[in-house]
Image (cartoon, rainbow, N blue to C red):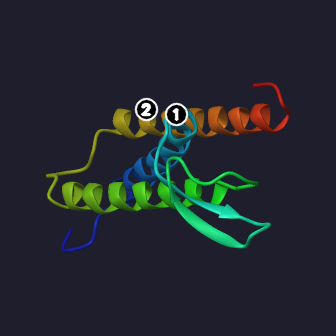
Amino acid sequence: MGKNMGKEKTYLLLVLSVLAFTGSYFLSEVFPFPLWWYYPLDQHWEFGIVTSKGLRMGWYGKVLLSAFCSLAVALLGGLGLKWMPGEPPETLADFLTLAGMGMTLFLLYYIVRILSGGA
């Protein structure tokens, strides 16, 4: 196979990255994480769990945190899969695909519920 990963390993890595993104986004909603907060009225940024009072937006920080988590899982998973002998079992790829789809749908439902005021 050479230095390149096969299609199955690349797909598995993509699914793991999606799971890391959606999982870290949801966890940052439930548990306090230090994030970048944007204050649109004052036009400045602050980093932390507890920031100053005022109108603030945490979405940018959540997406940045989730992107970093997804990138870290992709890099570590890529190293692990590169030295994995053979191809991953098809059932593992199927399970992680369903888990990724389920987590994405759950996260979208959660965001819609929060935005609609149903929390």
Task: Decide if residue 7 is on the left or right side of residue 41.
Answer: left
Task: Decide if residue 54 is on the left or right side of residue 49.
Answer: right
Q: What's the residue type where badge 1 is placed?
A: Leu
| Residue ID at (21%, 68%) | 1
Which x, y percent locates residue 30? 55, 32
In this view, 19 is above or below 72: above
Q: Residue furthest front?
A: 53
| Residue ID at (43%, 32%) | 95
Task: Decide if residue 51 is on the left or right side of residue 105.
Answer: left
Which x, y percent locates residue 86? 18, 51
Q: Few, some or many C-alpha atoms within 10 Å of disc 2 (few <14, some 14-19, many ≥20)? A: few
Viewer-proximal residue among 95 and 51 = 51
Q: Secondary structure at mark 1?
A: helix
**Mark 2 and mark 1 in contact (Cβ < 8 Å)?**
yes
| Residue ID at (84%, 31%) | 117
Viewer-proximal residue among 17 and 28 = 28
User: Mark 1 highlights which residue?
Assistant: 98
Viewer-proximal residue among 39 and 101 = 39
Q: What's the residue type where badge 2 is placed?
A: Phe
| Residue ID at (25%, 50%) | 87
**In which quarter of the view is residue 105 placed?**
top right
Measure the alpha-carbon separation of dots 1 and 2.
5 Å
Q: Residue furthest right?
A: 116
User: Mark 2 highlights which residue?
Assistant: 95
**In which quarter of the view is residue 44 placed?**
bottom right
In this view, 94 is above or below 65: above
